[in-house]
Image: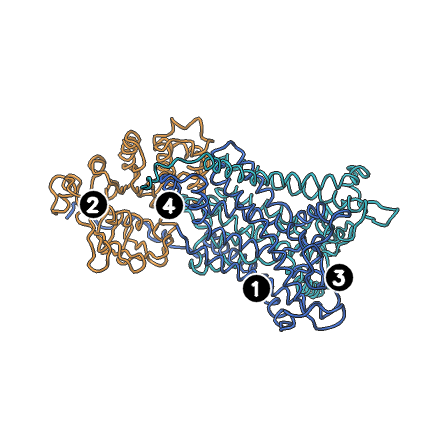
Amino acid sequence: MTDVVLRAKECDIYYGSYKAVRDVSIDIPKNKITAFIGPSGCGKSTVLRCFNRLNDLIESFRLKGKMTYHGQDLYAPDVDPVEVRRRIGMVFQKPNPFPKTIYDNIAYGPRISGFKGDMDELVETSLRRAVLWDEVKDKLQESGFSLSGGQQQRLCIARTIAVQPEVVLMDEPCAALDPISTLKIEDLMKELVQNYTIIIVTHNMQQATRVADYTAFYNAQVVEGAGGKVGYLAEFDSTEKIFSDPEQESTRDYVTGRFG
Amino acid sequence: MPSSPPSKRQRTPFEKGLDRLFEGTTMGFALFILLLLLAIGLLILVQAWPAVQRFGLSFLWTSSWNPVEGREVFGVLPMVYGTLVSSAIALLLAVPLGLGTALFLSENFIPLKIRTVLVFMVELLAAIPSVVYGLWGIFVLIPALKWFLGLFGVSFAGPSMLAASLVLAIMILPIITAISRDSLAALPPELRQGSYGLGATRWGTIFRVLIPAAISGIVGGVMLALGRAMGETMAVTMLIGNSNTINPSLLAPSNTISSLLANQFAEAKGIQVASLMYAAFVLVILTLIVNILADWIVRKLQAKY
Amino acid sequence: MTTISGKPDDIFDAGSLKAKKSSSRNLFNIIMTGLAGLCILLALIPLVLVLFYVFVNGANSLNLDLFTQLPPPPGSAGGGISNAIMGTLIVVAISTVISVPIGVLCAIWLSEFGSDDTSIDEYVRFGVNILAGVPSIIAGVFIYGIMVRPGRPGYSALAGGVALAVLMLPTIIRTADEALKIVPQEIRWAALGVGASKYQTVLKVVLPAAIPAILTGVTLAIARAAGETAPLIFTALFSPFRFNGITEPIATLAVLVYNFAILPFRAQQELAWAASLILVLLVLLTSIIARFATRQKTY
């Protein structure tokens, strides 16, 4: 039996009058890695960004349906998106360190959340958990930009876990990285999942099979007359089932590389 | 005779020469700009030379300006004081206002369409001629200040450091706003997302991430505005009262170097012209220092990241 | 469908997600947003006030005489500013004729040849920036020293035009440089690829493509120059008479505003407001035209 951390129920996502995603219902299990896979434009990143209300930054964004976090409606009018984002962190496709020192990059989140404890220790543990400590311990006062792409991405992961969220959303975290850095990040995810719930959006199916406990396959269909595509959740199951014996024809086609 | 295809035709030496001539000509005009700058500096210095010889560096700390024939004494200290103080007050007022405006216009507090209109309006503020601000200052701002200060029983003659500085602040505000807004808008959207993703509030993000990241552009804009304030002439001339003495009261008339030039050049003779040229040279050096400093600050702050 | 089950746990405190309106964090955000809004309000009040007074006072003295009559002698009423309107057009035309060719040719070298060469282009760009930072009155002082001071030809429309040209140069060079740079590299390759020489490529292909953007920059520079006063007061000086040749002193709107604003006579002050209105309308119109012109981009 696994606890449900995040739950989407019959969610439609709109940008202005354009419907980007339709009818997504999904339960995200606690302390597991859930992968979102699917062809481009199927709305997997869009759904991901709804979970920590980052889509609020887009003016025309609108959500219909219900998204809950431990049963609490995330989009209830009295919910503070800032509080949501402190509990549900996010790692982006492109490493995006702040133009600050490595130390200040990690300390940023705790500082704005009013962390009162030993900052040096928190920075060190966060960097250790992101398996970056040994590489940067002698240059904490250097700019975050002085690191390589893979190191920058681990810095961003360390920065996210320094806030000690419960859930970490990862939007194609390895898309901009070389294979060796990618493997390091994947190992890191397997480490982290003992304490965190992770959702990862990925284009790379091998990556999903390597790291994910559960996999959700999103697909897109052409909307008649509207001239656009709408994404939907085609199938959600254990990774093993999705990749070996999926229920849907489209899932089988996708995971065997016939399209997408 | 059948015409030969164009590809068979050889370029004549004349045509080849045209290319070099063209490049040479344009380069000549480019170098002309450098020559022009040099000429401005040199010409002013040469014309100032009689005054430089006569007053030396003490010109800078002499505070009397007496063009009466036979008793001429010229010193530029009161005008340097007026230039620096009026610019400083203008900056003090315009920097917070300009930065606040830039932040408001670079964030999505209001719909984009309204923001575009507001940006355009701030640009217009910069486009209104200086002399129109001066006219407005004389007939609208000074009477308004008189009335307002009168409420507190303060008597106010009108033309003063205060009036000049206020109008100066209005005039440099669009420079600060435009450059700050540009450098904020040039930041990658990932920075903002990264900060929001960590649970930062909007203003937390602005103060801790966006402003530090854009600081080089913002400081550069402020320095540019300072240079503009120091050289601004007409509105200041019409409002500052043109009194060549140092008076610590902001309500008293004062003078700036550029106002001195505007007032006296047309009727100056002999050593007075040289002294005005000397004053102009001081102004050139002051603005040059500010502009080069701006350049240096921008590069130094950028190198940090 | 999946093996996940279980109810939302009770341990989680749902209330902790709630926004607390009174929390210092939210209060701070509301206050800061209010302050920023106040900033833009304060910034725009002067604009509204200046435009309001210029339009009201200027419109009061707007009549046909304004465009046909000469300014009245101090103290008497009536008259117009026809000579100043004419003078502004003449002086600005002189400065445009001087600054546009120099500026555009300089920009052509910067964008088309400069980077092939050594670092001279960096010096030139730096020079353009410094020139842009030179106070406008210094341009007047410079031209006074060359063309006006005792022993030289003296106050003239020509001297005023040259002084304004010095000020227009950096704006024209910058906008022309930008405009030329936006022209896609492929167009140059295409022209060179059919055997055009460099000057043919630049003059017949690149420059025509950049002309609309360059014109926008020139228009803005002209509008700015028309309002400049400081470089004119001791180069073009002023004249109560009609245009009398470009080697004679000439009246301009900007200098007229300055001269008449400080006179204690009502008639002159009204003419100053009328001249201001014309200047402001000129600036407003060109700004709006330039804004719409840049919206329609060729590339």
The residue tagged 3 is: B157
Q: Which mark is residue A216?
A: 2
| Alpha carbons under labels 1 and 4: distance apart | 48 Å
Does the residue at mark 4 contact the one at mark 3 (Cβ under 8 Å)?
Answer: no
Q: Which chain is cyan?
A: B
Locate residue A243: give its quadrant: top left
Q: Are marks 4 and 3 on the same chain?
A: yes
Chain of residue at mark 2: A
The residue located at (14%, 48%) in the rendering is C1
Visual hue assigned to chain A: orange
Residue that sits furthest to the right in the current view:
B70
| Alpha carbons under labels 4 and 3: distance apart | 57 Å
Q: Amino acid at mark 1?
A: Leu
Helix, strand or loop at label 1? It is helix
| Alpha carbons under labels 1 and 2: distance apart | 62 Å
Residue C14, given in percent of the width and then of the height, sits at: 33, 52
Q: Amino acid at mark 4?
A: Gly
Q: Which mark is residue B197?
A: 4
Depth-wise, is mark 1 or mark 3 nearer the camera? 1
Chain of residue at mark 1: C
Viewer-proximal residue, B70 or A106?
A: B70
The residue located at (19%, 48%) in the rendering is C5
**Quick check: C265 left or right of B37?**
right
Image quadrant where one finds the C terminus of chain A = top left
Q: Which mark is residue C281?
A: 1
Residue A123, given in percent of the width and then of the height, sits at: 41, 34
Relative to B72, say whether C93 is above or below: below
The residue located at (42%, 32%) in the rendering is A121
Depth-wise, is mark 4 or mark 3 nearer the camera? 3
Q: Amino acid at mark 2?
A: Ala
Helix, strand or loop at label 3? It is loop
